[in-house]
Amino acid sequence: MSFLSSIGFIETEEQERTRLAQAPEGSLNRYLSTLPVTIDEWAKDLLVELPWQQPHTDRAYRIVVVPIEFREDALPEGVEEEPLPRKLHSGSWMCAVVFSDHPGYSAGGFRIDVPAAEIARGRKVDLAGALTALPSVSGETPHAPEPLCGSCEDSGLITHYHPSTDGITGYSRCDDAQCVARAAKRAAEHERKRAAEEAAAAAHVCAGHLCCPPF
């Protein structure tokens, strides 16, 4: 618990969950109340995969965003200051979509507003770590026999910079044919491995209270 939460200035995580759970059944906030907080740092410029509400559609989509600009919640008319305790993970982020397999959210700079509470329950994507791990997943020698993609160096993402400040303005998916084919092959192998791990976990029989975390 943070110091500000301990003195009642900001909600505790439990108070936030209770508040979110009061939202109508089927709403985003009601769903978020069932998820743990996984990102407890300032989210600006992070790569974050958003949690997908199930059963929201007949399949799970993956959307990865970069929070760019934070926006505070508007106070009700006539209210000048938020009452205590102030909301934990209040406000929202204006985000750029950098990866998406959802037909309604195209990657390449598409902007969406995401509640801060949703960002806080997303999965922080370690791009460098993910790229380092990819060759070991497929069992191939890194980038062999093909050379690195000249556009994205096999990261799959092309970074766009502001012409004056050199600040990052967004990302777009690389459309080089060979790069896309290699990425699809790696993704298929990763999905095969994930499915095998899930099947093994489902078949596991716990042997006692010290067998599986949490202990």
Image (cartoon, rainbow, N blue to C red):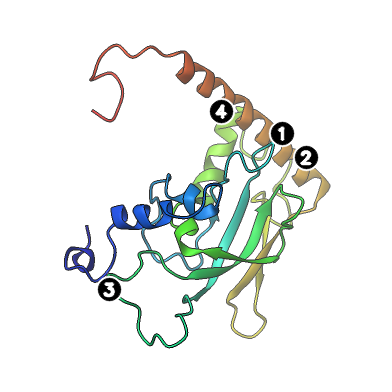
Residue 84 has which mark?
3
Q: Earlier in the sequence, mark 2 or mark 3?
A: 3
Residue 194 has which mark?
4
Q: CA distance from mark 3 to mark 4?
A: 44 Å
What amino acid is at disc 3? Leu
- Secondary structure found at label 4: helix
Q: Earlier in the sequence, mark 1 or mark 4?
A: 1
Left or right of 200: which side holds 80? Answer: left
Dot 3, crowdedness within 10 Å: few (<14), some or many (≥20)? few
Q: Earlier in the sequence, mark 2 or mark 4?
A: 2
Q: Earlier in the sequence, mark 3 or mark 1?
A: 3
Question: Pointers 3 and 4 in contact (CB under 8 A)?
Answer: no
**Quarter of the image that includes the N terminus:** bottom left
Left or right of 199: which side holds 187? Answer: right
What amino acid is at disc 2? Ala
Q: CA distance from mark 2 to mark 3?
A: 53 Å
Question: Pointers 2 and 3 in contact (CB under 8 A)?
Answer: no
Residue 140 visible, this angle: no
